[in-house]
Image (cartoon, rainbow, N blue to C red):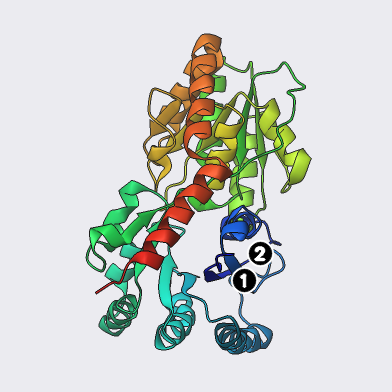
Amino acid sequence: MEEKSTILILGKLPPPLIGPAIATNIILNSSLKDEYELIHLDTRMNENLVTMGKWGFSKIYRSIRLYTDFLKKIRKHQPEIVLVPISQTTLGFIKDVPFIWIANSLGCKTLIQLRGSNIKNWLEKASSLTKMLVKSTFKKCVGVIVLGNNLKHLFTGYFNEDHIYVVPNGANYELQEKNTEEVTILYFANFLSTKSFDDILKAVALLKKKGITNFKLVGAGFWYEEFFEKECLTIIEKNELTNIELHPPQSGKAKMQLFANADVFVFCPKMPEGHPWVIVEAMANGLPVIATDKGAIVESVIDGENGFIVPSEEPNVIAEKLEQLINNSVLRKQFSEQSKALYQANFTEERMVENLKGVFEKVLMDNFV
């Protein structure tokens, strides 16, 4: 029997249910475990969304323990590949550096992965010392994985073209049956000012002024910012928007029921994104999508085919596209079918696993001279 190659994967696991944790969980439980000896180091620092971004002595202690556990796993399992997700902040990246340097010093092929698209913006503002650290650290890596082809440019100054790999997010879902006849617009993401839920509410207010109220807007997520929650609730109250339904974060069947009941998905972030899981979930449910051109979104949402790409911070354009989809059931059906087809062709778990396996095989065979 042929011996399996060993791969050490760093990454968070749920809870909380955030994109990177979802991805790690899928990968560890996928068919890849039959192809390779998968070893995992859980780098989770938070059990819930409230503590994210907040530091304390317990987290500092946890960070130190992680490096010790990491070193033990490498010595015990001697992995051929170590996969390290990297941060896009100075403090976050400094925490990632020891993993990369330790793995490299012990002869492992170190592969990094970026689950976002803000790294260039961060580095443009970073100090020269930070830039030197990033450059020297990347030199110890055999390649980088990004979430879309249009994100490869973020690393062209650091890696050869053939060592920048593309692995979009992908997952399988237990879909639910629609149980409402009302035309429903869904926003499913945390309520953050950077995600622009306020612009969606303003778009609904503009539609009301035109007499278009034959739909419901459903939003679900966690309110991170008190000021933004007040701002959004003020928009709802001031414009007397009675067709708004807000929910706390949902998961499992309850979450999938929201997607099943929706007719259109809208997600218009104004800051860099990776390949948002909510876009994948919307497409799996066959939803037309209205979104902004951030990260790898445009590789999932094809303007005029399965949705619309709109400019950031333009509620009037969101309103215009919503109006088209609300009043045109034929167009909704056309976009719906295309979303489903694009999902099945590109963003299932099997497709993500196949792409990741291709990366692992190339790294294992490549001498990187």
User: Where does the C terminus fall, quadrant-wise?
Assistant: bottom left
Q: How many residues crowd mark 2 within 10 Å: few (<14), some (14–19), many (20+)?
A: many
Q: Quadrant of residue 241?
A: top right
Residues at circles 2 and 1 in contact by the CB criterion of under 8 Å: yes
Residue beneath label 2, please?
13
Viewer-nearest of labels 2 and 1? 1
Above or below for 154 versus 318? below
Question: Of the numbered discs in the image, which one, if any, rests on residue 40?
Answer: 1
Residue reaching furthest to the front: 1
Q: Which one is earlier in the sequence, the residue at label 2 or at label 1? A: 2
User: Where does the N terminus fall, quadrant-wise?
Assistant: bottom right
Q: Residue 146: give x, y in percent of width and height.
A: 40, 56
Tell me the amino acid under the disc marked 2: Leu
Q: In the rendered view, does 282 fall on the left or right side of 218?
A: left
**Residue located 48% across and 23% down the image:** 338
Tell me the amino acid under the disc marked 1: His
How many numbered badges does the structure rendering display?
A: 2
**Residue located 72% across and 68% down the image:** 47
Q: Quadrant of residue 164?
A: bottom left
Q: Residue 198: give x, y in percent of width and height.
A: 54, 42
Q: Nearer the viewer, residue 214 or 228?
A: 214
Q: CA distance from mark 2 to mark 1?
A: 10 Å
Q: Quadrant of residue 178?
A: top right
Above or below for 97 versus 337? below
Q: How many residues crowd mark 1 within 10 Å: few (<14), some (14–19), many (20+)?
A: some
